[in-house]
Image (cartoon, rainbow, N blue to C red):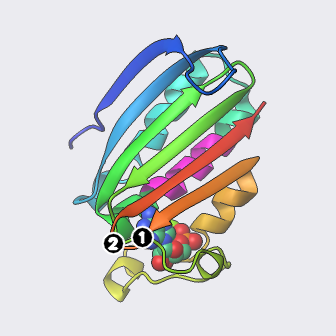
Amino acid sequence: MRRAACSIQAGSSETGSDMSESVRFRFNVDGSNFTTAGQASVQVKKNLRELGIPADAIRRVSIAMYEGEINMVIHAHGGEAEVIVFEDRIEIILSDRGPGIPNIELAMKEGYSTAPDNIRSLGFGAGMGLPNMKRYTDDMKIETELGKGTTITMTVRF
Ligand SMILES: Nc1ncnc2c1ncn2[C@@H]1O[C@H](COP(=O)(O)OP(=O)(O)O)[C@@H](O)[C@H]1O
Ligand SMILES: [Mg+2]
């Protein structure tokens, strides 16, 4: 089984005036293999435990990131995941070059899914991924362009 490629960097954040120390984890999410889908979120859970992040925050990050990672595999041929740990929050950035989301409001509805039957038979496609990503995070932003791809940024505060 191939492992998710992960690079870890310690450094300062570049986001605006917030210069608090951060640790970053980056992953390539392989879009061609359903059996390895979800690996990046499993690795992030381990990394966050080692950093001593509160258990509830780790749980929320794991759930939200797993759903986003699965979405990149089943809807967008894979992508990249980045997790940035700040002193008071974790940011998860998922970006892909998939088809984009035509109607975000519709996609956010519980139970809405465009997953085909062969994907559903694998147990995916319940249409609860995006709603749960929103529910388990403090902030979620979807940027998407048809034919270009989607970037989802989520924040979990602790
Ligand atoms: N990264 C993505 N790229 C393109 N479409 C997406 C992406 N993520 C979600 N979607 C669309 O939003 C719908 C709802 O997503 P979700 O709530 O996770 O349900 P599910 O993945 O079970 O279909 C998907 O069926 C798909 O049409
Ligand atoms: Mg989903």
* Mark 2 neighbour density, 10 Å: few (under 14) some (14–19) many (20 or more): few
Q: Is mark 1 within 8 Å of ligand 1?
A: yes
Circle 2 residue: 147
Q: Is residue 117 magenta?
A: no
Please report whichever mark, 2 or 1, sits nearer to the chain's N-terminal start.
Answer: 1
* Residue 134 vertical placement versus 47 (above, below): below
Residue at left 54%, top 48%?
Answer: 65
* Amino acid beneath label 2: Gly
Which range is magenta? 60-69
Instruction: For the N terminus, give its image quadrant.
Output: top left
Horizontally, residue 148 falls left or right of residue 90, namely left
User: Where residue 119 sits: x, y (%)?
Assistant: 36, 77
Q: How many labels were placed on the picture? A: 2
State yes or no: Cβ of the residue under disc 2 lies below 8 Å from any atom of ligand 1: no
Task: Assign the magenta stretch its main secondary structure.
Answer: helix
Above or below, 30 relative to 158: below
In the displayed structure, does residue 54 sit left or right of residue 7? Answer: right
Q: Nearer the viewer, residue 53 or 27?
A: 27
Question: At numbered mark 2, what does the secondary structure look like: helix, strand or loop?
Answer: loop
How many residues crowd mark 1 within 10 Å: few (<14), some (14–19), many (20+)?
Answer: some
Give how far across and how far down residue 128 sits, in percent.
Answer: 61, 71
Q: CA distance from mark 2 to mark 1?
A: 6 Å
Write down the residue under mark 1.
100
Instruction: Look at label 1 and name its amino acid.
Output: Gly
Do labels 2 and 1 touch, CB within 8 Å?
Answer: yes
The residue sitting at 38% across, 70% down in the picture is 75
Q: Is residue 124 something one can see in this rendering?
A: no
Quadrant showing the C terminus: top right
